[in-house]
Image (cartoon, rainbow, N blue to C red):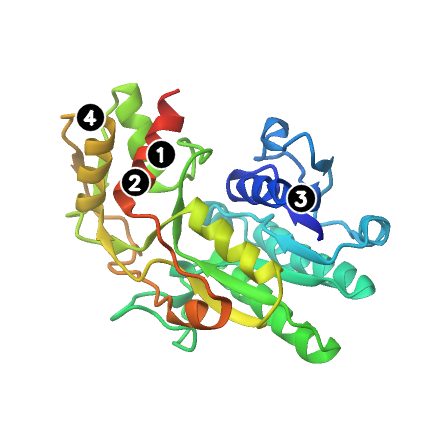
Amino acid sequence: MRAIVTGGAGFIGSHLVERLVARGDAVHVVDDLSNGKRGNVPAAATLHVRDVREPLDDLVALVRPDAIAHLAAQVDVRVSVAEPARDAAVNVVGTVNVLEAARTVGARVVFASTGGAIYGECVRPAREDDPRLPLSPYGTSKLAGEEYLASFSRLHGAAHVSLRFGNVYGPRQDPHGEAGVVAIFLGRLRDGEPCRIFGDGTQTRDYVFVGDVVQAVTAALDGGAGGTFNVGTGSETSVLELYEACRAAAGSDARPVHEPARAGELARSVLDPELAERRLGFRATTPLAEGLALTWAWLKD
């Protein structure tokens, strides 16, 4: 396969590039390096320092990929609230640019979307046809991206795929800034800093290991069903439970600091993975304790 991975120098993207290179695919990475790192890109892949807010037709015409994994995004919820136009420029216009370029060569697009930011509060594991109630411009921009993929599929007879990720964690996730809570907890435990838990810590999330996410993206790139699929475990873990699991992985006896709950934070977010298993043949298999151990081994070194 010839593949382009946007955001391929970042956390999830670099793991995907490694997987594709390892199986012999010809991989081109598109990344503006605003968050991604040049060192994350394997030597066997070709890096193009480009911004998805600008057309990619020339690059796609040169590479002529079979598929494009579109992972480049503005992912900071706080930035999306403060700068919704910037969020939309990256997540909506950037996605349209990828789709337009893919159309010219008939390439399949696999789009990295989000579960928690789209579904809103969950009363049970969310299914793909449940109401979509984003609470932030970030969730709205990702939902708009999904709708563009669906529209282009209908209009041009394509089989594009949107994958709604749960809370992805694993090696290479930055423990600073708007990182995932796993990276933040383990980073603070490594540095001897107190971990903060907002509210009572009973809020739950669906934590999915990056290796499993890469497996899902790869399955979608390889063909088969188009559409929208959850990528999660179907299991929810509270923040308190997660902290204890992180503490065990780090071998720490540190206690967390509780702070007031943050306005607008979801109490429950968990994804139903059944459709992805049935249509893509994907099921997350990495237990939380194993994934945390792998993340800790990378982070402490």
Tell me: residue 63, above or below residue 251.
below
Disc on the earlier residue, 3 or 1:
3
Q: Which residue is mark 2?
A: 290
The residue sitting at 24% across, 58% down in the picture is 267
Residue at which label 4 appears: 251
Q: Report whether 55 appears left or right of 205.
A: right
Binning the other alpha carbons within 10 Å of mark 3 as few (below 14), some (14 to 19) or many (20 upward) gives few
Q: Nearer the viewer, residue 276 or 189?
A: 276
Answer with mark 4 or mark 3, whichever residue precedes in sequence: 3
Mark identifier at residue 22: none
Residue at x 29%, y 34% (from the top left corner): 185
Q: Amino acid at mark 3?
A: Gly
- For discs 3 and 1, the disc positioned in front in the rendered view: 3
**Dots 2 and 1: beta carbons under 8 Å?**
yes
Q: CA distance from mark 2 to mark 1?
A: 6 Å
2 or 3: mark nearer the eye? 3
- The earlier-in-sequence mark between 2 and 3 is 3
Q: Residue 13: give x, y in percent of width and height.
A: 56, 43
Give the distance between the C-alpha atoms of the residues marked 4 and 3, in whole angstroms: 38 Å
Whole-percent x, y for residue 82 in the image: 49, 48
Name the quadrant containing residue 295. Answer: top left
Give how far across and how far down residue 240 sits, in percent.
17, 44
At horizontal 19% and vertical 33% (from top left) the residue drawn is 248
Instruction: Name which of mark 4 and mark 1 comes first in the sequence.
Output: 4
Q: Element at badge 2?
A: helix
Residue wearing tag 1: 294
Where is residue 75 drawn, in percent x and y?
A: 50, 48
